[in-house]
Image (spheres, rainbow, N blue to C red):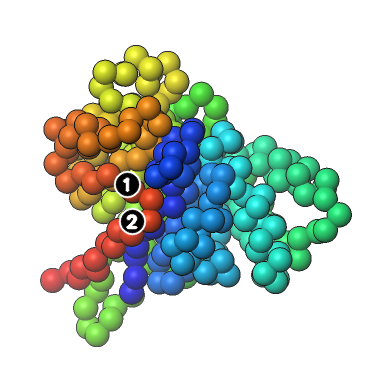
Amino acid sequence: MKFSLTILGSSSAVPTAARNTTAHVLNVHERFYLIDCGEGTQIQIRRYRIRFGRIHTIFISHLHSDHILGLFGLMSTLSLLGRKSPLDLYGPAGLEEIVTSHFNHFPDKLLYLIQFHSLEPKGKTLILSDKAVDVFSFPVQHRSPAWGFLFVEKVSPAGGKVPVPRSYAFCTDTLFHPPLIENFTGCDLLYHEATYAASHEHRAFATAHSTAGQAGEMARLAGVRRLLIGHFSARYKDTSLLLAEARVAFPETTEARDGDTIEIPQLFTD
């Protein structure tokens, strides 16, 4: 059974020629979950050959424009393509007003229902449980209310073997804040923002972001299997320095690149 992550955007607030703003697609047992939706996400979905109709649920971490501006075009396209099934949309409380007010300005209404689910400003919370995953939200430390997400696979015995549940944590945008590790300790793959290099740590603190080295330290403290860094500031034309800084604390680090797909292999208990 598949458990894979496709990177649609790995830049921070400003897109570049090589990197779009934040969006990930997680495929669990052929159910597709979109995490954040920066401007141009629907173009990336088409570019990387993800079927629009397979998008099952959308999660929005916070209401900064580089994480939500792609929603409106994507939702319109889903309607134009004939979507009829409801779309579940999880995000901060203000998201419903933003989305509904946008579409109220246009004469053509969506052909499907949007089911809004507001995230709660409390600790780790189960927000979705379907046949493929349990999804938890947890508050992170940013300039406005923001959340991370943990996806934990649901498994059942196969051929006499018991699969080990796979997990993916999405943690952006946030300050370096070690208490957050309790939300994703031991997960298979952690995506943690690495907006800045160590030389710009003052800038990271001022804007409530993290450095690459801090992302590596979070992965080390949490005991995760693999770290994926992204949300890179557009000032870095070459991100190899960021990767090197993260690997000082956590060698099993890779750099997110638009179009990359990371497979998490299935393991079984003895």
In this rendering, the answer to whether 239 lies above or below 25 is above
> Which circle marks residue 256 in the picture?
1
Q: Amino acid at mark 1?
A: Ala
x then y, percent, for residue 252: 17, 46
Q: Residue at x 66, y 61 (%)?
A: 77
Q: Quadrant of residue 152?
A: bottom left
For mark 2, what is the residue? 260
Q: Label 1, secondary structure: give it.
A: loop
Q: Residue at x 25, y 22 (%)?
A: 198
x then y, percent, for residue 118: 62, 44
Regarding residue 242, the answer to whether it shows in the image is yes
Q: Residue at x 29, y 78 (%)?
A: 157
Q: Is residue 45 left or right of residue 156?
A: right
Q: Is residue 26 left or right of residue 83?
A: left
x then y, percent, for residue 191: 34, 45
**For the image shown, how many numbered marks are present on the structure?**
2
